[in-house]
Amino acid sequence: MKFTDSQYDELMSTYHTHQIENRALAQTRKDEVYEKIPRIKEIDQLLASSSIDAVRAKLKGQSDCTAEVKEKNHALIAEKADLLKTHGYDEDFLEPIYTCKMCKDTGRIGNDYCSCFKQASISLLYRQSTLDRVLELENFDTFDLTYYSDEPDGIHELTPHENMVKILNKTKTFIETFDKEGGNLLFYGETGLGKTFLSNCVAKALMDTQHTVLYQSSIHLFEDVLSDVLMKKNQNSNSKEIYRYLYNCDLLIIDDLGTEFTNNFVSSELYDILNTRMRDGKSTIISTNLSLKELNERYSVRITSRFISDYMAFQFYGSNVRLAKRKRASKTQ
């Protein structure tokens, strides 16, 4: 699990906040109990002083009174628990408070990350991917193959349904072997056939296993983010962080390639992103409504050669799934 400095700082800031809030709550509870039950304050003071006295005696070489101290403290602790219970408090009311009792709000258990840290990191990755809300609806559990026809279309060897089953299986294999093999995917075909939906399925599956994913529409990436950073249009935006993340995230998704205004600047930056990520062993998913021929006509040879040699390309075809979903939804209303 690798994080940028800003990601790690954000995660640890959450733990620091928990520690401060829980200590404040514990102190409030202690103040309340001390006021209502003064004897408990006396007991806490006795427990603290007896332990210190025992350590001092041992350091001075005096007789070991550990057993005697333990017996005395045990009696004090029992009295304290009884007083709390008598006054309507739980026995652990004055114990330290932790949001996560397993790691005691440190994020780690020994040398390993605690499960709470792993979950917090997943939540962070969802937010930073810009997909947090979308992925609740678009994931492998909600991918519906019934929208793809079992009837041959007279053009392709496989029916739309058979083709989609094949793409799904290949995509799931891509996820299963991601850490060992990586790779890149190109989803192409007409609009409304599930390319973005499947990209989101991959994103969720990888983020659920703590991989970093960044989703960017082609228009936003080239006309906003890169223009902000490289053309210095808006130095106060978060575009610089996104720009760095473009090269470092485990998976980059560029959606709707071809909808941006294409010029030399776009072609140059697109090649730099693809080439740098390939060089560094980072994976990329490209989705586009353009055909392979149209991609070749629109972008430079060095870009399309990347798609041909370094990407697994999958063609989506069939009826417009997006429209079919709308029609089905309107009938159920």
Image (tube, rainbow, N blue to C red):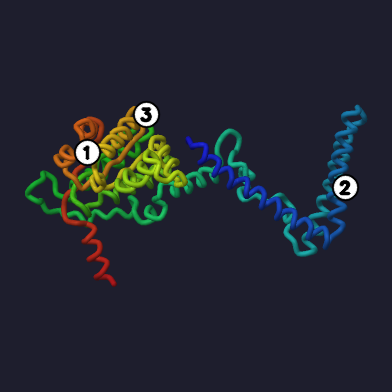
| Amino acid at dot 2 | Leu
Q: Quadrant of residue 61?
A: top right
Q: Which residue is mark 1?
A: 313
Kind of element beneath mark 2: helix
- Asked whether disc 3 touches disc 1, contact meaning CB atoms under 8 Å apart, the reply is no
Judge by depth and name the residue closer to the eye, 96 or 67. Answer: 96
The 10 Å Cα crowd at callout 2, few under 14, some 14 to 19, many 20 or more, is: some
Figure check: 71 above or below 179 = below
Q: Quadrant of residue 307?
A: top left
Residue at the location (32% across, 55% down)? Answer: 142
Residue 92's spot in the image, x, y percent?
A: 72, 54
Q: CA distance from mark 1 to mark 2?
A: 73 Å
Instruction: Farthest residue to the right: give it.
Output: 62
Report the side of 240 relative to 12 (left or right).
left
Q: Which residue is mark 3?
A: 280
Q: CA distance from mark 2 to mark 3?
A: 61 Å
Residue 37's spot in the image, x, y percent?
A: 84, 60
Residue 211's spot in the image, x, y percent?
A: 42, 40
Kind of element beneath mark 1: strand
